[in-house]
Image (tube, helix red, strand yellow):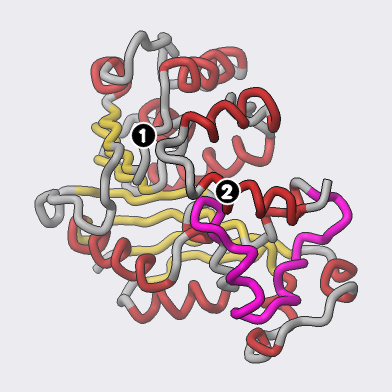
């Protein structure tokens, strides 16, 4: 189905108060209300866990952009985090959604937890040391300085505009302990490509900023920042880049489009990057 129809649907949803209609569409139309753990996503979460374990001792963790299923904080809890604070601008997680993930983690034999199902969101604190803060503002957490050892997010930073990325990261730096680590997995793909198989994963690079604005509704915002842009942001904020790598896409996806002039400063490698992994250190 044409990706522009999805774009139109997101624009229309902006005029509907609350998210009941959006959840109904996920359940009955897109089939994305409940989250299925794929191999690629599990690999990303295990990478976060491995980065967390570099701390060498149990520490506290903070996630921004929790999403509806809470896979990431559940994995960090199982890895021994003393506590996981997980923030989101909207309250999307429900016992049904979280329990669907817990059952999968049990079936996958992920070690470190009994994988008991919850009856309400408050059970997350009692059973998994997870504090779900939604709605919550990761730009201003109110947490004490130096109170968090590990910050992480998965497929979140591509959905936030650059000024707010900087505000969130400044707050994360403030609340991080000296030597604290940050682990980020970022998806540089055009997210409409998962809906419309006729376009490539780099399709959105053909549009100027002005053109892209009409295809970029708030609920489905994609900032189109490339790998080098994130490196620049992290370095500007004084974060040490311990490790970083690119996930490279298909050259055919780039060759089938005329790249917009606004991406003229980016290298071919930058344009072809479809994902980034970063491990950062706070001084």
Q: Which residue is mark 1?
A: 91
Total marks in image: 2
Indicate the secondary structure of the residue bearing disc 2: helix
Q: Outermost residue toward the left?
A: 144
Image quarter hosting the C terminus: bottom left
Picture quadrant of residue 201? bottom right
Q: Position of residue 118 (x, y in %)?
A: 37, 11
Q: Residue at x 66, y 23 (%)?
A: 28
In-image side of 151 versus 100 (left or right): left
Using a 10 Å C-alpha cutoff, classify the residue at mark 1 as few (fewer than 14 neighbours), some (14 to 19) or many (20 or more).
some
Q: Nearer the viewer, residue 214 or 224?
A: 214
| Residue indicated by mark 2 | 12
**89 versus 103 height, above or below:** below
- Is residue 12 inside the magenta stretch? no
Q: Nearer the viewer, residue 115 or 166?
A: 166
Query: With respect to residue 281, does 229 lie above or below?
Result: below
Magenta stretch: give its range: 196-221
Indicate which label's residue lies in the foreground, 1 or 2: 2
Give the distance between the C-alpha atoms of the residues marked 1 and 2, in whole angstroms: 20 Å
Residue located 62% across and 68% down the image = 214
Asked if one can make out residue 277 in the rendered structure from this viewpoint, the answer is no
Q: Position of residue 121 (x, y in %)?
A: 32, 20
- Residue under the image location 42 percent in, 32 percent down: 92
x then y, percent, for residue 23: 53, 30
- For this rendering, which residue is in front, 78 or 116? 116
Q: Is residue 165 visible?
A: yes
Q: Earlier in the sequence, mark 1 or mark 2?
A: 2
Residue 269 placed where, x, y %? 72, 78
Kind of element beneath mark 1 = loop
């Amino acid at each position: 189905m044409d990706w522009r129809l999805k774009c139109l649907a997101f624009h229309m949803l902006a005029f509907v108060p609350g998210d009941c209609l959006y959840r109904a569409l996920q359940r009955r139309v897109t089939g994305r209300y409940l989250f299925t753990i794929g191999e690629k996503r599990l690999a990303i979460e295990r990478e976060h866990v491995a980065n967390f374990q570099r701390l060498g001792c149990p520490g506290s963790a903070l996630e921004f952009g929790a999403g509806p299923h809470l896979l990431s904080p559940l994995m960090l809890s199982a890895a021994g985090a003393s506590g996981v604070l997980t923030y989101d601008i909207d309250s999307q997680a429900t016992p049904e959604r979280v329990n669907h993930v817990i059952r999968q983690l049990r079936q996958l034999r992920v070690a470190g937890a009994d994988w008991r199902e919850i009856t309400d969101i408050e059970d997350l604190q009692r059973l998994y040391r997870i504090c779900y803060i939604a709605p919550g503002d990761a730009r201003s957490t109110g947490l004490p300085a130096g109170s968090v050892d590990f910050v992480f997010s998965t497929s979140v930073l591509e959905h936030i505009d650059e000024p707010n990325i900087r505000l969130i990261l400044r707050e994360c730096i403030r609340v991080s302990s000296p030597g604290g680590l940050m682990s980020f997995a970022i998806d540089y793909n055009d997210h409409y490509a998962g809906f419309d198989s006729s376009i490539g994963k780099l399709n959105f690079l053909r549009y100027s900023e002005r053109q892209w604005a009409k295809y970029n509704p708030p609920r489905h915002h994609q900032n189109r920042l490339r790998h080098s842009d994130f490196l620049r942001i992290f370095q500007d904020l004084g974060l040490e880049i311990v490790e970083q790598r690119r996930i490279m896409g298909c050259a055919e996806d780039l060759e089938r489009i005329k790249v917009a002039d606004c991406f003229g400063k980016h290298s071919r490698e930058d344009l072809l990057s479809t994902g980034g992994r970063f491990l950062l250190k706070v001084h």
